[in-house]
Every structure is written in C-alpha cells, then in structure tokens.
Image (cartoon, grey):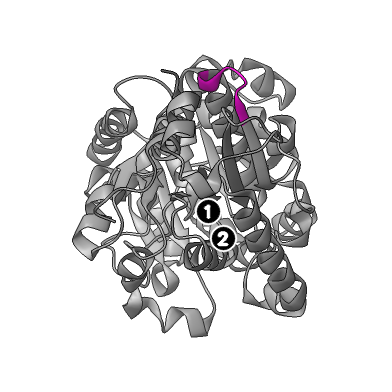
Amino acid sequence: MSLTDRAAANRPASRKRGSGAGRDDLRIFLVAGEHSGDALGGKLMSALSARCKGRIHYLGVGGEDMEAAGLASQFPLSDVAVMGPLSILPRLPRIMSRVYRTVDSAVAAEPDAVVIIDAPEFTHPIAKRIRKRAPFIPIIDYVSPSVWAWRPGRARKMRPYVDHVMGLLPFEPAAHQRLGGPPCTYVGHPLIERLDWMHELDPAPLAERLQLDPGRLVLVVLPGSRTSEVTRLMQPFGEALELLHARRIRPQVIIPVVAHVRPLVERFAQSWTVQPHLVEGEEDKFRAFRLAHAALAASGTVTLQLALAGTPMVVAYKVDGIAAHMRFLLNVPSVVLANLVLEENAFPELLQEDCTPEKLADALEPLLRDSPERRAQLAALARIPHKMLLDGGTPSDAAADIVLDYAVHGRRPDR
C-alpha cells in the first residue's frame, strides 16, 4: 500500500475527501513567514513531491520558492515578512488578519499535516489556533526557535500545539529534551548541502578581478547585514586593522556585502587606513572565504558559513544599551553557532565592552601567521562538518520523511 493510500485509510471518516484533490492524495498545509523559510519550504516540497510521485497537494503561505514547487499562496509573503518589533507594530493589524485567515484556511482544508516554517512570531500563533480548532491535525515545526539560548520556557509551552520539531543544529534535540519541549529530530542545516560546492568553488576569478597580490595575506571582514550591525561594528573593525597595520601586519581586506547596506559600508570604509574590496553575491562571498587567511565577523549564521568553509575567525558583536543589559537572560556558553556545534569555545568572541580595536587586533594577529592559535582553530574547523553531516540524504530528504510519517500515521497516541 502506498503512502497516500495508507493516509486515506487512516484518515477519520469526517475528513474523507470528495473529488477536489482526490481522496488518495496527501494534502500538506505549509506556512512560512519570511524569505529564508520560503527557501526551506521550497526544498521540502520538492523532496515530498519526489517521494509521493505527484500524489500530493499543497496549500498555505509562502513565497517564490514555495510557489515554484507547487504552492498557491493564500497571500503575498511580503504581507508578513517583517523583522523586529519596531517593524511589526505598524503592521500588526494586517499581520493578525493574515493569521486568522491562514487558520481558517488550514482548518477548512483538513490537511494530513501542517508544517510551520521558522518565523515563530507569525507561525506559532497560527499553530496554536489550528490545534485548538482541529486537534486531530499533526503540526510539525521546521526550524526550532532558539530556546537553547533565549527564553527556554518556550520549549515546554510548545508541547500542546507542536507534535515534532525539525532542528537545523545538531545540539537542538538534546536541548528540547532537557527543557521539556516537543520531540525534536536533527534534520541537518541547509548549508551542509553546499559543502562540496563551497570547497570546489574556484577563488581565482575573484582574486584576478580584485587584482589581489598573491604574496600578501587576505582578511575577510563581515560587519553584518543589518544597518544597526554595520553602524556599530565598522568603526572598531577599521581601527583594529589600523593597529595591525602599525604592527606591520597588512592583509588585503575583502568585505562581502548585501546591496541594502553597501552605501553605509562604503561610507564608513572611507575613513579606514586600509581600503577594502567590496563584493556582492553568494559566489563571491564564498570565493572570498576560500582566499582568506582569517575572518573578522559579526555574530550570526555567517560564522557557521565560515566554519564550514574552513576559515579561521574572530567573532564580535555590539548591541544597544537596553539589549546589553538583558544579556543575563542568555542561556548559552557562547553566541557563536560554530562553538555551540562543537560544544567548546574554539573561536574567540568579543562582545559589547570587549569589542574594542585593541582586543580585536590581539585576537586576529595570531590567526594571520603560523601560530598555536591558528593551528588549534584549523583542527576545530576540521571537526565541524562531521558534527553536522547526516548519515545519508539531504536535510530536505530527512525533513520530508518526518512530515510524511505524521501525514500518513497521524498524531502520536502519546501526544
């Protein structure tokens, strides 16, 4: 019996379909709230479709990637894809109307499973309301909220309305178990699908285009993708380079940027002693990682990108005064994802009052020469892929297996 046949047989009588989607077809309702979730959702849908050989129907909310994979979105993703409370507040009435509309659609569709994808401020209110109105529908959360770092009580609060969490980081299943959260499975970070691509990418075209001197070191500087990050980090980063220059350590500098902060980066860089090369796009960013002897990076997902690319790094971050006073609420030994994956603080992090030009330069200097610190980082970097790789298949394949298990067999009896 096929997956879809078993799903039809297990479906409660009140949920038997008419002639709409075909009673043998699986019906999956997916909800993404931002563009990174849309990318994950599109890959998940492709993996699901490959397994079900077309006998699957998608509904929900998504963007271009999910629509290309077969979703007719209830409304444009731009209606809800906002970041931070200051951006959300002016649009709260519209966002809430989209929440209610999505819940109504999900309940009316009677899907075999609901998959919420990241963006917990948008997707979790939807999941709670679906569970209240249609408790028989399995709900899977793709991308765990960072309960291991911030507000750990959220893990236990998720149990009543999330049946399973699909984590992108290998330490997340243990964190949910420790915190009393829903069952959680590590399905793999999408970056591991790009490991071969990262290491096969030829950096020579970038070196030629930037006219880099092959006899000099290269340092990659990553001041962040948000205006607030660039504003707080470009000055200490530039002054750290000045100190290195005074110590006769004069690397060539490449700054990968996203388009919306490029003018701001250029304005700050005008005052730097060392004039950097600015590049845009994923390929040139990873080419720069391949060329770099080391990196100076803002904390964030980019530290995991650097780690998987094998680039030694110093990580820094500064926040506003109010956020700085809330650091005591953090529940982790490090804010660097690569450190958390390794379960050791292999990569130095200089946060807030420690993010000074002197400390940044002191941490970078040994990484720009043959030193015990550099060798230790290279050894740590070699271990990270082994921590993150799956036994077989891709992250999207692993996620699809879990979604289909719930779609076919329904909610677990112990839930």
Where does the C terminus fall, quadrant-wise? Answer: bottom left
Measuring from the top left, give residue 166's x and y in whole percent.
Answer: 39, 44
Q: Amino acid at mark 2?
A: Thr
Q: Is residue 53 magenta?
A: yes
Report whether 277 appears left or right of 201.
right
Residue 80 rendering spot, x and y as whole percentages: 71, 62
Question: In the drawing, does residue 337 fall left or right of residue 32?
Answer: left
Q: Which residues are magenta?
A: 51-56
Residue 34's disc number: none
The residue depicted at 56 percent of the width and 58 percent of the height is 119
* Res. 11 in view: yes
What residue is drawn where x is 48% and y is 42%?
Answer: 295
What secondary structure is marked by label 1? loop
Query: Do we see residue 266 in this rendering?
Result: no
Tell me the kind of residue under disc 1: Asp
Q: Which residue is mark 2?
A: 123
The label on residue 118 is 1
For label 1, count other residues whose C-alpha is less than 10 Å away and answer few (under 14), some (14-19) or many (20+).
many
Q: Earlier in the sequence, mark 1 or mark 2?
A: 1
